[in-house]
Image (cartoon, helix red, strand yellow):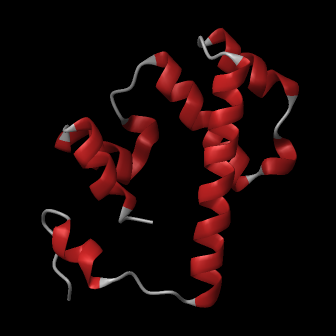
Amino acid sequence: MQHHGAGLRRLIKDDALVEQLKSDWRQANLDDANRAMLTYAAKLTLEPWNVVEDDILALRQAGFSDTDILDINQIAGYYAYVNRLAQGLGVELEDFWSENEPGRSAE
């Protein structure tokens, strides 16, 4: 969902990185820990049945604690859940999201 980019932009204040992440996070300029986190989150979102212990070990090797890994898991799972609810019901974004994202209009 594209509207999450607006919130990320407010948090990290790096328009170029946000655009990289929105177009293809695999090509974005990320450190090893963030790349490992996004690799795990993508796998958990797109193919959770293929998540194995080595995926967790990769996060630990990237410097994440077990608490961090639980947080990553829960946040990725929550967003997957909420996005599926919205998409499954055909929910349209409020005009607010389009109006407040640079370069986008409500139309």
Residue 72 found in image quarter:
top right
Q: Is residue 101 left or right of residue 54?
A: left
- Residue at the left extreme? 103
Q: Is residue 50 left or right of residue 27?
A: right
Q: Is residue 60 above or below residue 1?
A: above
What's the residue at 50%, 27% (across, down)? 35
Residue 44 point in image, percent of width and height: 72, 46
Quarter of the picture holding the N terminus = bottom left
Residue 104 point in image, percent of width and height: 17, 72
Q: Is residue 77 above or below residue 33?
A: below
Q: Is residue 30 left or right of residue 70?
A: left
What's the residue at 84%, 43% (across, down)? 50
What's the residue at 32%, 53% (across, down)? 7
Q: Is residue 10 left or right of residue 39?
A: left
Q: Is residue 97 above or below residue 80?
A: below
Residue 57 point in image, percent of width and height: 76, 17
Q: How many marks?
A: 0
- Residue at the front extreme? 67
What's the residue at 41%, 47% (across, down)? 24
Q: Is residue 93 above or below residue 62?
A: below
Depth check, front residue: 70 or 42: 70
Quarter of the picture holding the C terminus = bottom left
